[in-house]
Image (cartoon, rainbow, N blue to C red):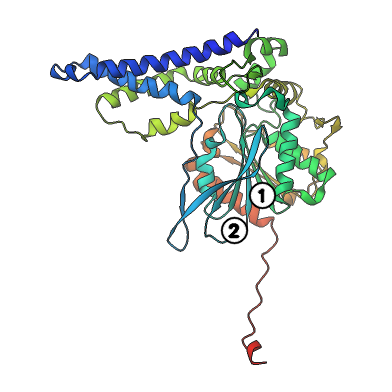
Amino acid sequence: MRYMATYDLMESMRNTNQWLGASALSFASYPLFSMVPNPALQWLAAWGEVTERTFQRMVAKPDWGIRTFTCEDGKDHLVNIETVVERPFGNLLHFNVAGREEQPRKVLLVAPMSGHYATLLRSTVKSLIVDNEVYITDWHNARDISVSEGKFDVEDYTLYLVDFMKEMGPDTHVIAVCQPAPLALAATAYLAEEEPDAQPRTLTLIGGPIDPDATPTDVTDFGNRVTMGQLEEMMIQRVGFKYKGVGRMVYPGLLQLASFISMNADRHSEAFQNQIARVMREEASEHDAHNRFYDEYLAVMDMTAEFYLSTVERIFKEREIARNVFTVAGKRVDIGKITNVAVKTVEGANDDISAPGQCVAALDLCTGLPDSMKASHVEPGAGHYGIFAGKSWRNNIRPLVLEFMNANSPAPAKKKPANKNAAAR
């Protein structure tokens, strides 16, 4: 019970700020006040509207918002989001475009479990759905998972990826974005030794910390400075009575959001001040640039304590992936066993979270792969977000990734022409 009060205190603070925003908006929008226009009341109403929305979004899972897709026939086809594999801590989803022929490439997007929902990759999904069958890992909010479901750490995460890859089959192209890159590499190596026929065709690692010490950043420096005891004492709390996961030890999403914002506090403060001014001038809208970004950015989820702590200890501090000594259920996973899965790394030149050098380290670990099946790319001027979303991804990185997939896929079988004389026989 020690940390329940702290967890509920944070939720109470969020709830109070949401209520204050709603109250300010309601008070300043009172119809009688319109008889005597006052800029102070207009500002209060704008502040209330922005504040209420901001704190409300922190506990709401964003919608995918991918409902239709225009195919080559010029018609809009419904996109059905289907659950292929359902598990307690995460599902495998398929974006099935109704009425469209099955696409030749199957792509598994491994979404990060680092505080945000898989919907953070919405634009990535939209760009790939054009000419691919797209699947994605949809990780669940730990506060909504009953304690009876047990633990979930980096080894469990790796085994989830193994199961998802086995479900999709050997013709899969895997793209791991950020946090899951080292574990996706480990899952591929696990399959290479245990079930080689289930390995994917290609593995693309985007901005992931394969070797965090290759190019240190503020994130890796923090992990090295703080002891595991300090980390557990400062960051881990117990889910309160309001949620299904009551009693589960977690790294709260609200706590991580506070860390995110503190890294660029001035930029976020300016963004919200500007948004309040736009609301005052009636220049803001439901889906303007500010709301589109912050509706996603502010929507955070809790991680299980064991996953967060094991990630810091084993991936960052002990560098088990970088040293090729990572184990799953007591068995070492040898990355050198990967011999026929083409591996590509993508990094952003201006990435301040997973700096250039951290991800490309994966290629040196793949000692069983010929150089012809390895590739790397550093995107000039791109930050962490830009390498999987935005202009850099759409214009430069996506075409390179698809080209890499095609180069490492078997040529499609040619259809035999129909025998026009068959009916005459």
Give the percent coordinates (x, y) of residue 84. Answer: 64, 46
Q: Kindly identify which residue carries mark 1.
A: 173
Specify the quadrant of the image occupied by residue 329: top right
Give the percent coordinates (x, y) of residue 125. Answer: 54, 45
Seen from the viewer's position, the closer of residues 371 and 162 is: 162
> Disc 2, disc 1: CB below 8 Å?
no
Label at residue 406: none
Between discs 2 and 1, the one toward the N terminus? 2
319 sits left or right of 53 in the view: right
Residue 329 at least partly seen: yes
Identify residue type, mark 1.
His
Helix, strand or loop under label 1: strand
* 246 versus 390 height, above or below: above
Residue 342 at least partly seen: no
- What is the distance, in whole Å, between disc 2 and disc 1 at their CAs? 13 Å
Q: Identify the residue at horizontal 53%, vertical 10% (top origin).
A: 9
Give the percent coordinates (x, y) of residue 376. Answer: 65, 43
* 202 versus 190 height, above or below: below
Image quarter of the C terminus: bottom right
Give the percent coordinates (x, y) of residue 320. Answer: 78, 28
Label at residue 103: 2
Seen from the viewer's position, the closer of residues 337 and 230 is: 230
